[in-house]
């Protein structure tokens, strides 16, 4: 991964210092997580070469797996989520990159109420965590940051009840606090009154920095000023048909996740053994 800006301390020295901190931390070493130079460098870059903050974020990454949500991660396997990659998709990385910032664009929606029984908030959280694990090794994501897009299309009362304070806290702890990515923008589209009400309920529980980057689009045209309609799935206001939605997605993360199934399952087994 390349160095984005010049630092007072050379990148190589910061990396060595972070490795020393990690190697002296028994909790991290015993976690079974693959701690390599590329992994550590992602946290350094994402935390703007602040050694203390990078180390603290790695500790959070380990803590949510070994303690806070060990039951969740001890059951994690990409193979249990294969259906999440089928169409119609509920989340995914777009092929499109923001031309100004170079940010990768990640879109997601809540599955319609009719799918409540087989796609849960926990499933979505798992899929996000697996995707973020792979983004750690993607230069563009670490250096440039991410743009998130959430669509309210298909959002119903059953989904609204899913967004409890406890679940929001879990989602933030796992997918925001424990990773080094900078969320540059968070766009909300297809905003029905029910979706807007849920956003208002959730907003106080979000980190202040993330709250300040939320943009609510009252018209689809204003969203198209950010992400062109020809590169957006139909359920987020794209101009293509639902049958052609597959053309707008980048499948790199899914392939990488499935390629590392053995690693994820070994890690889950190790966490499960630690619970007994």
Image (cartoon, rainbow, N blue to C red):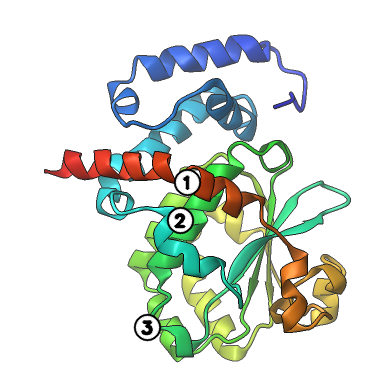
Mark 1 or mark 3: whose residue is earlier in sequence: 3
The nearer-to-camera label among 1 and 3 is: 3
The mark nearer the N terminus, 1 or 2, is 2
Q: Cα distance, mark 1 to mark 2? A: 6 Å
Q: Which residue is mark 1?
A: 177
Q: Is residue 205 visible?
A: no
Residue 195 percent location from the top left of the image? 57, 83
Residue in front for this viewpoint, 245 or 2: 245
User: Mark 2–mark 3 contact, CB under 8 Å?
Assistant: no
Whole-percent x and y of residue 245?
73, 74
> Which residue is label 3 attached to?
117
For residue 92, above or below residue 241: above
What residue do we see at 59% from left, 33% from top? 47
Q: Residues within 10 Å of mark 2 (few under 14, many from 20)?
A: some
Residue shown at the point (61%, 81%) measured from the top left: 152
Name the mark on residue 172: 2
Give the structural element (helix, strand or loop) at label 2.
helix
**Looking at the picture, how far across and down is residue 32, in whole percent?**
34, 31
CA gap, disc 1 and disc 3: 29 Å
């Amino acid at each position: 991964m390349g160095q984005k800006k010049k630092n007072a301390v050379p990148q190589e020295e910061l990396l060595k210092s972070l490795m020393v901190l990690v190697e002296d931390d028994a909790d991290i070493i015993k976690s079974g997580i693959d701690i390599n130079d590329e992994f550590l460098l992602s946290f350094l870059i994402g935390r703007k070469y602040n050694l203390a903050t990078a180390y603290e974020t790695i500790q959070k990454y380990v803590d949510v797996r070994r303690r806070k949500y060990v039951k969740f991660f001890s059951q994690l396997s990409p193979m249990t989520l294969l259906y999440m990659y089928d169409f119609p998709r509920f989340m995914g990385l777009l092929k499109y990159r923001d031309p100004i910032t170079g940010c990768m664009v990640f879109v997601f929606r809540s599955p319609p109420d009719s799918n409540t029984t087989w796609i849960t908030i926990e499933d979505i959280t798992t899929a996000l965590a697996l995707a973020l694990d792979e983004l750690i090794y993607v230069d563009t994501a670490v250096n440039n940051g991410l743009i998130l897009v959430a669509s309210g299309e298909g959002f119903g009362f059953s989904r609204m009840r899913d967004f409890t304070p406890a679940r929001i806290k879990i989602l933030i702890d796992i997918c925001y606090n424990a990773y080094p990515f900078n969320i540059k923008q968070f766009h909300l589209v297809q905003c029905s009154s029910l979706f807007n009400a849920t956003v208002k309920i959730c907003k106080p529980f979000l980190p202040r920095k993330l709250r300040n980057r939320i943009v609510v689009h009252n018209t689809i045209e204003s969203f198209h000023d950010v992400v062109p309609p020809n590169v957006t799935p139909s359920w987020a206001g794209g101009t293509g048909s639902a049958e052609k939605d597959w053309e707008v997605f980048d499948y790199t993360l899914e392939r990488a996740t499935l390629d590392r199934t053995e690693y994820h399952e070994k890690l889950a087994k190790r966490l499960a053994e630690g619970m007994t």
